[in-house]
């Protein structure tokens, strides 16, 4: 179905090809996983299949890419629209209408699909992806996860033979991701749909993949059975890491396979009951009381209370549309707040605006202030937010200019922001335009801009989207260091593996209300939806990560 014949591709003005001498074949009805480090060229590989590269991106293509016998060099994307569908990393950028139902039928209208067929396909896709409650809503009013499901549905209504998915579950909560992947696998099994799926959260998709393509930072590409490609790789989900640690062969790809093999380990570690050490009382850096957010007739938040303490990492979880982003923006100060109060503690020696209703001096002489009362340039030095769409904070034409502007606004030493960027995403060229960066690289740039101001309170909205496992490890190190220095971090995430790695505390929202607020090990081991893979494999043991298993095994020796 898909054939790369000695393909090399280089972007305009780039000094090195992003892909080198790629030679592979994807059979019809195959679900192929595409993996690789952040910025390695996974998106480029997908764009070569539907002709976006080089017809839209520009660049030099050597070799031949064919899809069902059609040469993509001779067939631009519009000529392949009946054959290939693509869902990009940023689904909002691809929307062309205002409402969900209009977006779902737009592609069929462009292909002159008969009205009766359009209606049938529309209802099928709505049922398949659970879009019924959303069909009449405005796209701009949907959560990021809901928008991602709509983008997938808009492609699937065209009945493509090849489906290209770039991070399709990155904005979805675990149950929604399982539903989408189940729908995709049904299409693969039932109608022979061919799927290329680029994803960093391999724990969600590895078990479904017939084969895997690995893309290296040097442009090299390898293709083979998923178990062979992921076994021993640094880009591997926790069950594969666990299997490698215990010497299992063959390596498991699913929780089910791993759990069947793990009975001896569970017996060996059954006396290990790790608990989080009691945290001594710490300074409250942010306090929210009865925060409400109302958008017209929709209640996003209903009387939420939350306190963030110095030295603490708190992970905010919940279904798509639960109110996580609304809460982060309300805490930051620039977001909408219908009722309630938010106060942050200002460091000693820092004065607050002279607004009696928005500041108060405590008994210890420190000042508390509503962040909404601070000017934006001043607020980011105390409470900073990295949004779901990092591009919203980027407006200059090079990474170098963004970094220099960040250093100036933060009064930090020149080079501070660029150094943080290189820590999070090594190899990002300062001369690149931010729009030419991968999703993960853009996020790294925005996070670096916010960290350059050294805010005490750091708010992150889905910070692991587009990041590979190694980039997540570096991000976890920065977050831990920030907390260790006396700051606090609140991040919303559907990435349960990342939450298991860094969280001291987990708060779960549902329908705008806090339903759980407790130690991470308690919340993550007791939840069927938000448990990491290791916790599922070893339940009822209270272990969350492969590192925790390694430490427990050492204690038993």
Image (tube, rainbow, N blue to C red):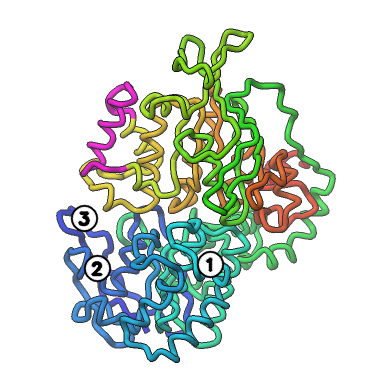
Q: Is residue 150 above or below residue 396?
A: below
The secondary element bearing badge 2 is classed as helix
CA gap, disc 2 and disc 1: 33 Å
The secondary element bearing badge 3 is classed as loop
| Residue that numbered label 1 is attached to | 134
Where residue 373 sits: x, y (%)? Answer: 46, 25
289 or 245, nearer to the observer? 289
- Ranked by sequence position, the earlier of labels 2 and 1 is 2
Q: Residues within 10 Å of mark 1 (few under 14, many from 20)?
A: some
Question: Over which residues does the magenta segment extend?
Answer: 394-416
Where residue 443 sits: x, y (%)? Answer: 39, 45
The secondary element bearing badge 1 is classed as helix
Which mark's residue is nearer the viewer, 3 or 1? 1
| Residue that numbered label 2 is attached to | 53
CA gap, disc 3 and disc 1: 44 Å
- Ranked by sequence position, the earlier of labels 2 and 3 is 3
| Residue that numbered label 3 is attached to | 16
532 or 4, nearer to the observer? 532
Residue 159 showing in the rendered view:
yes
Residue 553 showing in the rendered view:
no
Q: Quadrant of residue 454?
A: top left
Q: Quadrant of the C terminus?
A: top right
**Residue drawn where x is 78% and y is 42% of the image:** 556
The reply to whether callout 3 and callout 1 are in contact (CB within 8 Å) is no
CA gap, disc 2 and disc 3: 16 Å
């Amino acid at each position: 179905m898909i054939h790369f014949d000695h393909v090399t591709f280089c972007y305009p003005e780039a000094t090195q090809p992003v892909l080198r001498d790629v030679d592979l074949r994807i059979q019809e009805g195959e679900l192929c996983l595409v993996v690789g480090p952040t910025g390695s060229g996974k998106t480029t590989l997908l764009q070569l299949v539907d002709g976006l590269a080089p017809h839209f991106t520009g660049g030099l293509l050597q070799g031949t890419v064919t899809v069902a016998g059609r040469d993509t060099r001779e067939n631009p994307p519009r000529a392949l629209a009946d054959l290939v569908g693509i869902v990009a990393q940023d689904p909002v950028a691809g929307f062309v209408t205002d409402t969900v139902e209009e977006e779902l039928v737009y592609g069929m209208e462009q292909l002159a699909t008969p009205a009766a067929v359009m209606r049938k396909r529309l209802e099928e896709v709505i049922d398949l992806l659970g879009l019924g409650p959303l069909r009449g809503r405005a796209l701009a009013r949907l959560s990021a996860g809901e928008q991602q499901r709509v983008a997938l549905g808009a492609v699937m209504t065209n009945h493509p033979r090849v489906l290209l998915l770039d991070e399709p579950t990155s904005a979805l909560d675990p149950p929604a991701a399982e539903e989408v992947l189940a729908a995709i696998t049904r299409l693969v099994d039932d109608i022979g749909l061919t799927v290329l799926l680029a994803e960093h959260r391999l724990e969600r998709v590895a078990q479904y993949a017939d084969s895997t393509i690995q893309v290296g930072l040097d442009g090299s590409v390898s293709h083979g059975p998923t178990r062979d490609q992921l076994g021993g790789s640094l880009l591997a989900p926790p069950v594969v890491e666990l299997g490698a640690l215990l010497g299992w062969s063959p390596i498991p790809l699913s929780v089910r396979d791993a759990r069947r093999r793990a009975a001896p380990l569970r017996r060996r570690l059954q006396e290990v009951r790790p608990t989080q050490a009691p945290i001594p009382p710490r300074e409250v850096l942010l306090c929210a009381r009865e925060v409400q957010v109302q958008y017209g007739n929709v209640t996003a938040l209903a009387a939420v209370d939350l306190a963030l303490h110095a030295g603490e990492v708190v992970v905010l979880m919940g279904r798509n549309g639960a109110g996580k982003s609304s809460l982060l923006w309300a805490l930051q100060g620039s977001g909408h707040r219908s009722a309630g109060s938010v106060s942050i503690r200002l460091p000693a020696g820092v004065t607050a605006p002279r607004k009696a209703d928005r500041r108060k001096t405590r008994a210890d002489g420190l000042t508390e202030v509503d962040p909404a009362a601070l000017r934006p340039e001043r607020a980011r030095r105390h409470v900073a937010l990295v949004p779901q769409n990092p591009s919203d904070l980027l407006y200059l034409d090079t990474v170098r200019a963004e970094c220099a502007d960040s250093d100036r606004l933060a009064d930090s030493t020149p080079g501070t922001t660029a150094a943080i960027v290189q820590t999070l995403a090594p190899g990002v060229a300062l001369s690149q335009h931010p729009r030419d960066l991968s999703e993960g690289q853009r996020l790294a740039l925005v996070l670096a801009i916010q960290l350059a101001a050294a805010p005490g309170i750091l708010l992150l909205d889905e910070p692991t989207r587009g990041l590979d496992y190694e980039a997540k490890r570096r991000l976890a190190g920065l977050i831990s260091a920030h907390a260790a220095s006396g700051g606090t971090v609140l991040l919303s995430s559907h990435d349960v593996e990342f939450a298991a790695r860094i969280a001291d505390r987990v708060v779960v929202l549902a329908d705008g209300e806090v339903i759980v607020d407790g130690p991470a090990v308690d919340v993550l081991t007791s939840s069927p939806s938000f448990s990491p893979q290791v916790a599922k494999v070893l339940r009822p043991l209270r272990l969350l990560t492969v590192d925790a298993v390694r430490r427990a095994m050492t204690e038993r020796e």
